[in-house]
Image (cartoon, coloured by chain):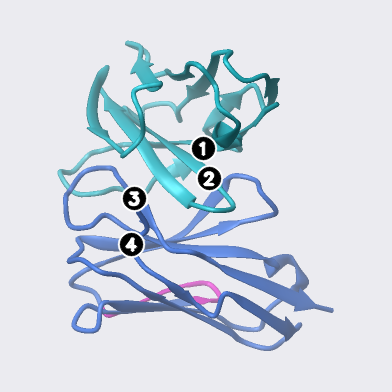
């Protein structure tokens, strides 16, 4: 099976702009989670989507949003970009067969730079 | 917020030596996972150990879990230069959600 794919891989934006990142999960996986990685804060959970519904959300401002489509592909959007949004954004998918936490498989990430 | 700390923050060894990394966490868990990250790329899943397991092996990897001490260790035996990476532990905080809370990571450098 193909792994998790993320597009674009690199992105440069300026403050105040908005950005949309895309994630295609492993075939058959219905759960998609997003994480932000920065040198200062490390890896932080953004949100999880399952069956097109947001199941959980991390401690991020409302400028960060996401959605999931019927084919499980997911997008996340950041509006009114700030310099501090510069980060590696990682998407992960899992089968979510059980009620517990499953193994999550990560994509290569999107490196966002805000100037 | 991060679940806990990893120790050491950085580790430098020679090829062939063993590398041990420790992870401490704060809350009860359902399971704990270890991931590897090469130079700012995506995370590669290494191993998952459930809260009712004490030890698990996968190839050159051995993971232990002590829920009474809220700690885990990852041992890589006979290290290779290709093992150079950052290693992270991650827990689910016992919620059952697909939310992972990561440790601060250990940077491992294996020199030929």
Query: Which of the marked residues, 4 or 3, is nearer the chain's N terminus?
Result: 4
Q: Position of residue A62 (x, y in %)?
A: 34, 23
Q: Colour of chain B?
A: blue
- Say yes or no: labels 4 and 1 on the same chain: no
Tags 1 and 2 touching, CB below 8 Å? yes
Which residue: 73% across, 66% down? B82
Q: Chain of mark 3?
A: B
Q: Which mark is residue B100?
A: 3
Q: Are marks 2 and 4 on the same chain?
A: no
- On the image, numbered disc 2 is attached to which residue? A37
CA distance separating discs 1 and 2: 8 Å
Give the residue number, with chain letter if any, for mark 1: A90
Q: Work out how far the residue at label 2 is from the one at label 3, CA to CA, in angstroms.
A: 13 Å
Q: What residue does disc 4 label?
A: B3
Mark 1, secondary structure of its residue = strand
Residue A88 is situated, as x and y percent measured from the top left of the image, at: 59, 39
For the view shown, which residue lies furthest in the right direction? B112
Distance, label 4 to label 3, CA atoms, is 9 Å
Answer yes or no: is residue A51 visible: no
- The label nearer to you, 1 versus 2, is 2
Percent x, y for residue B12?
71, 81
């Amino acid at each position: 099976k193909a792994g998790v794919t993320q597009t674009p891989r690199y992105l440069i934006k300026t403050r105040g702009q908005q950005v949309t990142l895309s994630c295609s999960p492993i075939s058959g996986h219905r759960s998609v989670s997003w994480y932000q990685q920065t040198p200062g804060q490390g890896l932080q959970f953004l949100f999880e989507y399952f069956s097109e519904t947001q199941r959980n959300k991390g401690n991020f401002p409302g400028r960060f949003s996401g959605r999931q489509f019927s084919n499980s592909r997911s997008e996340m959007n950041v509006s009114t970009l700030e310099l501090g949004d510069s980060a590696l954004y990682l998407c992960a998918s899992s089968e979510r067969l059980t009620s517990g936490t499953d193994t999550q498989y990560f994509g290569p990430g999107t490196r966002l730079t805000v100037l | 917020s991060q679940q806990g700390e990893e120790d050491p923050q950085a580790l430098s060894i020679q090829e062939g030596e063993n590398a041990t990394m420790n992870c401490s966490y704060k809350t009860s868990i359902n399971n704990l996972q270890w991931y590897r990250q090469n130079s700012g790329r995506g995370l590669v899943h290494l191993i998952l150990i459930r809260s009712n397991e004490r030890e698990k092996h996968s190839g050159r990897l051995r993971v232990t879990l002590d829920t009474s001490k809220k700690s885990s260790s990852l041992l890589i035996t006979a290290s290779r230069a290709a093992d150079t990476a950052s290693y992270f532990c991650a827990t689910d905080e016992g919620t059952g959600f697909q939310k992972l809370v990561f440790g601060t990571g250990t940077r491992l450098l294996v020199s030929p």
